Amino acid sequence: MPHDMPLLTTIALGLSVAFLCGLAASKLRLSPIVGYLIAGILVGPHTPGYIADIHIAEQLAEMGIVLLMFGVGLHFSIKDLIEVRKIALPGALVQISAATLMGLGLAHYLGWSLQAGLLFGLACSVASTVVLLRALEDHHLLHTANGRIAIGWLVVEDLVTVLTLVLLPTFAVINWDEIESGGVEWREISMSLFTALAKIGMFVAFMLLVASRVLPWLLNLVASTRSRELFTLASFAIAVGVAYGAGKIFDVSLALGAFFAGMMLRESNLSKQVAERALPFQDAFAVLFFVSVGMLFNPNIIFSNPLGVLLCVLIIMVGKSVAAFVIVTLFRYPLKTGLLVSAGLSQIGEFSFILATLGVSYGVLETEARDIILAGALITIALNPVTFFGSRLIYLFIKNHPQLRHRFDLSDDDPLAHLIEPPKGIGAPSSTASRKTILLVGASDVATYICHHLDFDQTNLIIIESNRERVESLREQGFQAIAGDAGSEETLKESSIDQAVAIIIVIPDALEIARIIAEVRRVKSDIKIIVKDRREMGTLDFIHNEIDLHVKASEEIGRRIVDYIKKMD
């Protein structure tokens, strides 16, 4: 009978209720995470009805943490961080510090320990990667310059979270009351920290020197068998096995072990296949993780300590968002960037749950603190779409009021204000009236070929690129370049699409190309569309009829565009 099989019952009921609640949340245009947490509350001990086995749920949650961190490591990109390091690195660190200080203030007000206040503040400072990526995708901002800054910001937050998870066991055993009273042996604390860091160092050295070679070799060996099932099993076994070994052999957290396992596999030529195979496991156990977190949440905290919940929500939605906005504007980034980053970070999610759950298990946090964090997460995730909408209203309000517009200097939000004439060596007439305007989506090496093939006496080239740093580099070289999403009507209009005769698309993502083409046709139906084909994208059959010209190689683009211009005369 089902009641004799608590593991199966917990998984079956947890996933079923999570599916229904997640579907309902999606229909209400909320993050599915809200639905998963509510599902956990419904089957948890704090609500009437069936109560799932909390001990089994906690073990499933541990598995969920392992796979979540494995996924973070597998998709962790130093390259993405380097591209936006000038703003993401200092910005995230200052924002985390500000949120942690605010969390410490709330902890002091509520009478919690210094340890609890620090961990509480850190939990309030870390935004949900899942929620932010979903919001960026919904608003078609994922591949924009501002989207990359927000993602880079998250990468820094993830690194700080990983460091916190590393030090948490040592952090938990320190007697802070004795430190405050002056009766603590600093030698013991120093030795404890040294021992913990030495174990971590040995683990990192082992992963870099041994695992970085053995794991890719093992994957290639499995891939040579051409067995999909065996490759899937290998991906799952590496994630769980390395995490378990890290805990048993090196005495470090399972989360850190899983994170490094993902990082090592990212460098493999089979990393994409690993991600595809591990994703179903990761998604399923991540759902069970959110359900288990919901089971631990006591909804009565909203009534027993409403002020604590309210202050927590204000720290997340107002405090750290304002801090992020101020930091971005101080670095002289556009108003849009500041509003997007602050809106995207005005929520907390899976890493906050991990910190809160482990904090309780190590005795650093009381259950009340965990419940306040979970309540704050539920509320802020649910309100995140409203935050994005509000940021848009704020931008339009400032843009429509000259005094505020001047104060915030929106000139950089209008990319055309920074357009400069093409390089002198290429030829640049005094007027653009007699030239044909061409839009180029994506830059990279293609811009070099364009320079050598396009006749700038006849052509006015405007490059649309999602990477802000690359845009700045193009402008320094003398190109007209704007940072934005070519699939956005606003960006297309800012790029003077109404004057353009053709648009060239050279990005590698077929689905993004399809989205951009649909928007381009909607904004200007008679524009010529040229696409650079890539083998990895397939034949693009689903948008073939919308394309006027396929170009197979970068060298062709300039020559073919010149031919098009001549035919238009």
Image (spheres, rainbow, N blue to C red):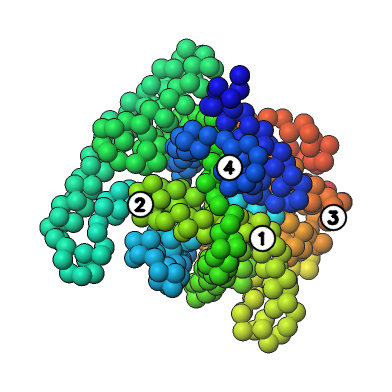
Disc 2 to disc 4, how far (Cα)?
22 Å
Proximity of marks 2 and 4: CB atoms separated by less than 8 Å: no
| Image: 410 above or below 305 | below
User: Which amino acid does the dot numbered 1 rest on?
Assistant: Leu
User: Which amino acid does the dot numbered 2 rest on?
Assistant: Gly
Q: Nearer the viewer, residue 273 or 103?
A: 103
Q: Quadrant of the C terminus?
A: bottom right
Is residue 69 among what the camera can see?
yes
**Quick one: label 1 or label 2, which is nearer the N terminus?**
2
Tag shown at residue 524:
3
Image coordinates of residue 460 in percent, x first then y, are 71, 61
Query: Which secondary structure, mark 2?
Result: loop
Image coordinates of residue 396 in percent, x first then y, are 73, 73
Query: Which secondary structure, mark 3?
Result: loop
User: Which amino acid does the dot numbered 3 rest on?
Assistant: Lys
According to the picture, the residue beneath numbered tag 1 turns out to be 383
Residue at image location 70% in from the left, 51% down from the top: 30
Image check: 166 left or right of 355?
A: left
Query: Which secondary structure, mark 4?
Result: loop
Is residue 481 among what the camera can see?
no
Within-10-Å neighbours for mark 3: few <14, some 14–19, many 20+: some
**Quick one: label 1 or label 3, which is nearer the N terminus?**
1
According to the picture, the residue beneath numbered tag 4 turns out to be 44
Residue at image location 51% in from the left, 14% down from the top: 226
Disc 1 to disc 4, how far (Cα)?
24 Å
Disc 3 to disc 4, how far (Cα)?
54 Å
Image check: 209 left or right of 444?
A: left
Query: Which secondary structure, mark 1?
Result: helix
According to the picture, the residue beneath numbered tag 2 turns out to be 363
Within-10-Å neighbours for mark 1: few <14, some 14–19, many 20+: some
Proximity of marks 1 and 4: CB atoms separated by less than 8 Å: no
Looking at the rendered image, the disc whose residue lies closer to the viewer, 1 or 3, is: 1
